């Protein structure tokens, strides 16, 4: 859980950053990331 939790936090951080920086395609991309995680 520790390792998976750390990976999830990293993915969430980059995912949120990408969503905030790029407002075009990342919507579907972010959804795919959230569903994958």
Image (cartoon, rainbow, N blue to C red):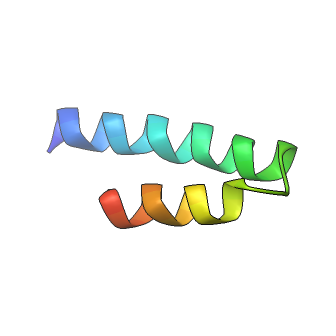
Side of 21 relative to 11 (left or right): right
| Residue most extreme to the left | 1
Residue 37: where, in percent of width, then height? Answer: 32, 56
Vertical placement of 28 versus 33: above or below? below
- Residue toward you, 3 or 29: 29
Residue 30: where, in percent of width, then height? Answer: 57, 58
Residue 33: where, in percent of width, then height? Answer: 45, 55
Quadrant position of the N terminus in the picture? top left
- Residue toward you, 27 or 10: 27
Q: Quadrant of residue 3?
A: top left
- Residue toward you, 31 or 10: 31
Side of 7 relative to 30 (left or right): left
Residue occupying the point 69% across, 54% down: 26
Residue 20: where, in percent of width, then height? Answer: 82, 50
Residue occupying the point 58% across, 41% down: 13
Residue occupying the point 60% across, 65% down: 28
Vertical placement of 35 versus 23: above or below? below
């Amino acid at each position: 859980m520790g390792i998976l939790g750390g990976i999830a936090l990293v993915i969430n951080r980059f995912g949120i950053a990408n969503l905030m920086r790029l407002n075009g395609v990342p919507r579907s991309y972010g959804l795919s990331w959230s569903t994958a995680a």
